[in-house]
Image: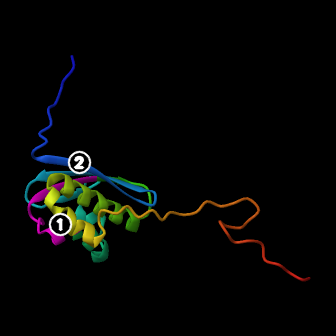
Amino acid sequence: MVMVVAKNNETQKRAVGRRKTASARVRLDTGTGTIVINGKKFEQYFPIAFWQQKVVAPLEKTGKMKQFDISVKVEGGGINSQAEAIRHGISRALVEWDEALRPILKAEGFLTRDPRAKERKKFGLHRARRAHQWRKR
């Protein structure tokens, strides 16, 4: 027996945000403004206010703070990269929800995927570009 669950695309939008090696799958639902990240409350997952501000920045700039329930699954990267990946995913989901929000989010740079990532280590070197130190004796 196969069960098919119909998704209501009018009340739910999905998007993916990325930064370095962090990837965040964001689900946006109409609701009261709760944010759940990897099954934990938003404040519990990001205990420092700086990271919390990064995550909610797109909602604050668009004035949609108490309008959506957000569920996020994030993996990879560090805590800061995860916060920026979530911000990117929320911004993309908001634009999918309402195209009129695009200029606001684009002006803030929230829709741009930051391409900077760690450069790979090359053989014969200590790090990506750090060569051996020359020594006279």
* The disc label shown at residue 59, or none: 1
Q: How far apart are marks 2 and 1 (CA)?
A: 15 Å
Q: Name the residue under label 2.
A: 14
Residue depicted at x 46% and y 57%: 21
Looking at the picture, which amino acid does disc 2 mark? Arg
Relative to 42, is 96 above or below? above
| Whole-percent x, y for residue 118 in the image | 54, 63
Crowding at mark 1 (Cα within 10 Å: few <14, some 14-19, many 20+)? some
Residue depicted at x 77% and y 62%: 124
Please provide the residue range marked out in magenta. 58-72
In the displayed structure, does residue 28 sit left or right of residue 135?
left
In the displayed structure, does residue 70 sit left or right of residue 79?
left
The quadrant holding residue 37 is: bottom left
Q: Hey, which residue is sitting farthest right in the picture?
A: 137
The quadrant holding residue 105 is: bottom left
Residue depicted at x 23% and y 63%: 42
Crowding at mark 2 (Cα within 10 Å: few <14, some 14-19, many 20+)? many
| Whole-percent x, y for residue 50 in the image | 30, 76
Residue depicted at x 69% and y 72%: 130
| Whole-percent x, y for residue 76 in the image | 43, 55
Relative to 18, is 43 above or below? below
